[in-house]
Amino acid sequence: MNQTVAPETLSVSQLNAVIKAVLDTEPLLSHVMVRGELSNFKHHIQSGHLYMTLKDEKSSIRAVMFASSAKKLTFRPENGMKVIVEGRVAVFERDGQYQLYLTGMQPDGLGALHLAFEQLKKKLEEEGLFDPARKKPIPKTPLKIGVVTASTGAAVRDIIHVLNRRFSAAKVLLYPVLVQGPEAAPMIVEALAWFNREQAADLLIVGRGGGSLEDLWAFNEEIVARAIAESKIPVISAVGHETDFTIADFVADLRAPTPSAAAELAVPDSAALRQRLENVNRLMADLLLRQTSAGRIQVQTLAGHRNMQTPLRYIEDCRLTIDSLIQRVYFSQRQKLDAAHRMLGLSAGKLEALSPLSVLERGFSIAFKENKPVRSAELLSPGDALSLRFAKGGAEVLVTKTYLQSESTEKGAKYDADEKKA
């Protein structure tokens, strides 16, 4: 008789660990490709991880892509986007839920590169990196030109050939880089940084020859676009053929349709420049000749002037003019001096009339009490000692009596009458 063995009792954690071990050892689930539609998409800013749900018409499964893999995406995932993902299936033991751990993702339908191109173009345009106002002017005659491209291939040969043919005075400095593949973009960024750090060029040409969208993709990388935008040295982009457009073309200070055209735009044509200089020299020579002729005529005119023919007569005329000026100055100053003398006489007469000495000469005297002039009898008392000042000499007197104005007037009138009798 068979006996049923009772199963071992497991904890929830143990059960989840068993399921995880089973899934982790299943080869089919260690690397899967799954097609579905994105929903519940979240980008965790702090960690950089991406969380989402992948679904179709009947089912859904949770998925996560860690920051190390998310940084390699060439487009920005969005809800509703149909994608093909790559990764493994495993259990998150804490929640007991299985989910996809993604290592890759690409759009399903529209090509990933085209989508990434449009998304990055829109992002950088919104930031203003394509704004014509921020583009730097291209120098007219750069003497040091930096070229960032592959050291082999038609692009570098065409650029150097055109630069030497058009403007051999310019020094060309090549910084060789890879122009396709995963290492191309970092090398281009480093080349731009070196030229700016060393200030080794007046102008930079960055580009490569033609190719497929995948071949040109290094010039669609965001790090390359931002390096071009941040360059203090003006940049001409020269990527692919005339119909090819890259993000670098939109960010650069000037876009050239081909590497050869970039060299044409970078420097002036030395032959045309030489012809222009010859024209300027000819114009300057004609101008100098006209000015010399005009100066010669002016000298001849001056030489024929009477003063130049008889310079002594001119000097005599100047002497007469000076003598006349001296006489006018003398006469003017004499008139001013006479007027000043008259004013001085009038002022002296007025001062003489107002002088106290003139009053004393007419028979008046001045009384002083304690060296101060006495202006009123009210200030005196009988017995006060006074000093009298006459036109000639003086006297010391004692006051015996004082009186007011009325008495003084009567005595004065009597004095005048006695004077008349006498």
Image: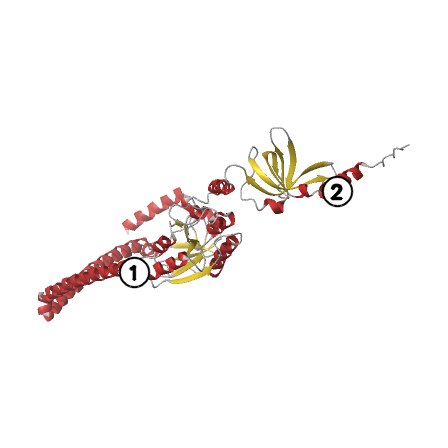
Label 1 residue SS = helix
Q: Nearer the viewer, residue 165 or 132?
A: 165
Q: Position of residue 139 (x, y in %)?
A: 37, 55
Q: Position of residue 58 (x, y in %)?
A: 63, 28
Q: Could you tell me the amino acid type at mark 2? A: Ala
List the residue tagged with mark 2. Answer: 21
Snapshot quadrant of residue 245:
top left
Please tell me the numbered disc located at residue 270. Answer: 1
On the rendered structure, is 95 left or right of 346?
A: right
Question: How busy is the neighbourhood of tag 1: few (under 14 within 10 Å), some, or many (20 plus)?
Answer: some
Q: Nearer the viewer, residue 317 or 237?
A: 237
Question: How busy is the neighbourhood of tag 2: few (under 14 within 10 Å), some, or many (20 plus)?
Answer: few
Snapshot quadrant of residue 351:
bottom left
The residue lying at 76 percent from left, 38 percent from top is 16
Q: How is the image coloured?
A: secondary structure
Q: Nearer the viewer, residue 398 or 295?
A: 295
